[in-house]
């Protein structure tokens, strides 16, 4: 245990500044690599996720695909999405992509969250929800470009993939990685995973004829800590990934500019009326009694 | 607004006022005038109740960092968030009734524009009495009324979007609604300080109009001279001077030795 490091918080929702002691220790940024070209759709990662996070399986709907359920749920964070894509030449691609939280470097959920400490980004890149601080406003749902946070109507709180922060903090790989039988899922430092991903994409381009093969690591959210190798990186939408994920600008402007400024104005309403009462006093119904005269009448300005 | 609509609104208001007058009563003593009937008072305090419930639950959503200590009163953050929209609907509904009730006296007139140009004298207290053409509501009250009407529209539209969430309306509408909802709340919060101040310690004698429903004649000729003239048929200026003469003659002359 002595060589284990606790997770260091780097960003905290609704909270100004970083946590004390940030940067005293350097953590490697972790990353999950999903190679969609070697995924066989076995769903072992789905089971491992539900098992490790102790989430009972709930009834689902069948929608004529291989998919376990139409979309992730508050108690089902890891879902293989099966997409059927028809190429211009008439051939069909059956695409399998593991859908989960992307752990963005610039997380939209955290930017949108008003609650102090409900969302934390650790120095190793993991974005985690702390449900004890969550107020269930669901603003994170609108902040996330990947449709990941899910509301639980029973607890009135929001849940998502933790990248197994409990395991990673103890030096273990996430549960989904451990379960993957094909090596399609890899886990390590961001630099290493990026290198492996680029090498694999190059291999796909050079040796397998996937001329557009590439790595999905969208820079519009500062890069992500889950990256994909795609057969065709020019069209991530066929894997139901957004091409250019963005965070609504209004959240940033509102939180760091308007909130303090306008809040101060509202407070001035309170201070203003007190100042008015002290300096100019109340206006009373007329006629008032005659004012006092003589030496102790006070100063009349 | 077509004539038929406005008259149906009037019929509704009259019916409600009559019904509430049977349920409660307003005692007007000699030297006083009826200001607000039972219906208006009940609506006002219903609006106030819902306003503060929505405000305090809203604080917990707006800045949990500062207002987390508020949330236990409402059963915690998530429950505050669940109840906030219901309080908001109550606020908009009750204020909607009040808006119908007050639609007529709140219509903007040329006298109000003059009052607004003269606002400096009123705020500084240089003008002891409001201008003689100030009616049942002055221009400041009307501005606040229409601000709340506008605010309610913003609350309702953006509130429904926030209530249903990004899964129903999409991400951008929610992100924009969040900002507009908060701006509207902050304007109203600034306004409520002024409203409470002027109706209590800022202009003494005002608060009883929303509690008992009656105000003193002196209050009426000071702050709403045109209304005083309309209901009594007497000249506010003259009555004020009359009262001043009486007061001066009743004060004791200095003792002669």
Image (tube, rainbow, N blue to C red):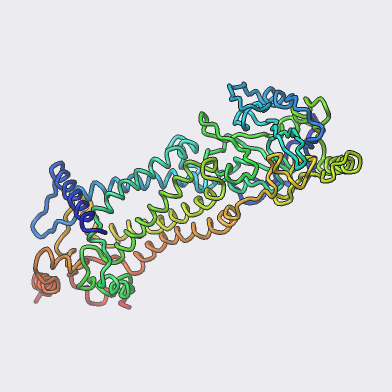
Residue B34 is situated, as x and y percent measured from the top left of the image, at: 14, 56
Q: Quadrant of residue A213?
A: top right
- For residue B68, side relative to residue B147 (left or right): right
Residue A272 is situated, as x and y percent measured from the top left of the image, at: 40, 63
User: In which quadrant of the rendered image does the N terminus of chain B lie?
Assistant: bottom left
Above or below: residue B231 compared with residue B52: below
Tell how many labels: 0
Residue A179 is situated, as x and y percent measured from the top left of the image, at: 77, 25
Q: Quadrant of residue B249?
A: bottom left
Above or below: residue B164 compared with residue B222: above
Question: Considering depth in this image, is B46 or A226 the residue closer to the camera?
Answer: A226
User: In which quadrant of the rendered image does the C terminus of chain B lie?
Assistant: bottom left
- For residue B146, side relative to residue B101 (left or right): right
Question: Considering depth in this image, is A297 or B68 the residue closer to the camera?
Answer: B68
Residue A124 is situated, as x and y percent measured from the top left of the image, at: 75, 41
Q: Residue furthest right?
A: A207
- For residue B135, side relative to residue A15 (left or right): left
Q: At x 54% / y 31%, what residue is drawn?
A: A152
Q: Residue furthest front?
A: A90
Question: Considering depth in this image, is B60 or A42 the residue closer to the camera?
Answer: A42
Question: Considering depth in this image, is B182 or A24 the residue closer to the camera?
Answer: B182
For the question of whether residue B252 can be seen, the reply is no
For the question of whether residue A6 can be seen, the reply is yes
Q: At x 87% / y 43%, what residue is drawn?
A: A205
């Amino acid at each position: 245990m002595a060589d284990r490091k606790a997770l260091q918080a780097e960003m905290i929702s609704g909270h100004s500044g970083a946590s004390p002691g940030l940067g005293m220790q350097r953590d490697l940024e972790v990353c999950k690599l999903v190679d969609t070209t070697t995924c066989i759709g076995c769903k072992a990662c789905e089971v491992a996720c539900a098992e490790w996070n102790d989430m009972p399986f709930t009834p689902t709907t069948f929608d004529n695909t291989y998919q376990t359920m139409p979309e992730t749920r508050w108690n089902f964070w890891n879902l293989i999405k099966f997409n059927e894509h028809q190429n211009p030449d008439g051939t069909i691609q059956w695409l399998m992509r593991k859908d989960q939280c992307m752990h963005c470097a610039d997380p939209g959920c955290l930017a949108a969250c008003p609650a102090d400490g409900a969302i934390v980004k650790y120095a190793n890149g993991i974005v985690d929800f702390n449900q004890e601080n969550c107020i269930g406003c669901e603003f994170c749902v609108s902040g996330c470009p990947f449709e990941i946070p899910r509301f639980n109507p029973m607890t009135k709180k929001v849940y998502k993939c933790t990248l197994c922060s409990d395991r990673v903090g103890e030096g273990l790989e996430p549960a989904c990685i451990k379960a993957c039988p094909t090596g399609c899922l890899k886990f390590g430092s961001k630099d290493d995973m990026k290198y492996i991903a680029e090498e694999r994409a190059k291999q796909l381009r050079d040796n397998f004829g996937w001329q557009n093969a590439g790595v999905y690591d969208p820079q519009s959210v500062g890069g992500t800590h889950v990256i994909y190798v795609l057969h065709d990186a020019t069209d991530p939408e066929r894997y139901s990934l957004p091409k250019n994920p963005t965070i609504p600008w209004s959240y940033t402007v509102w939180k760091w500019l308007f909130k303090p400024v306008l809040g101060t104005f509202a407070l001035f309403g309170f201070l203003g009326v007190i100042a008015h009462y002290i300096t100019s006093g109340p206006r009373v119904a007329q006629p008032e009694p005659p004012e006092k005269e003589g030496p102790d009448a006070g100063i009349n300005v | 607004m077509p004539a038929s609509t406005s008259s149906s609104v009037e019929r509704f208001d009259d019916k409600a006022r009559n019904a509430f007058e049977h349920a409660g009563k307003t005692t007007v003593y000699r030297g006083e005038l009826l200001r607000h009937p039972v219906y208006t008072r009940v609506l006002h305090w219903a609006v106030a109740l819902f306003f503060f419930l929505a405000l305090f639950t809203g604080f917990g959503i707006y800045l949990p960092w500062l207002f987390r200590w508020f949330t236990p009163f409402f059963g915690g953050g998530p429950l505050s968030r669940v109840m906030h929209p219901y309080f908001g609907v109550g606020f908009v509904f009750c204020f909607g009734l009040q808006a119908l009730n007050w639609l007529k006296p709140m219509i903007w007139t040329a006298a109000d524009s003059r009052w607004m140009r003269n606002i400096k004298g009123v705020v500084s207290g240089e003008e002891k009495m409001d201008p003689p053409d100030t009616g049942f509501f002055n221009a400041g009250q009307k501005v606040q009324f229409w601000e709340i009407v506008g605010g309610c529209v913003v609350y309702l539209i953006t509130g429904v979007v926030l209530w249903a969430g990004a899964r129903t309306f999409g991400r951008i509408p929610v992100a924009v609604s969040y900002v507009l909802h908060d701006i509207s709340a902050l304007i109203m919060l600034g306004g409520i300080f002024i409203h409470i101040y002027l109706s209590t310690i800022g202009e003494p004698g005002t608060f009883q109009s929303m509690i008992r429903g009656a105000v003193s004649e002196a209050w009426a000729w000071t702050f709403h001279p045109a209304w005083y003239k309309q209901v009594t048929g007497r000249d506010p200026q003259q009555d004020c001077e009359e009262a001043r003469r009486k007061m001066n003659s009743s004060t004791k002359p200095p003792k002669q030795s």
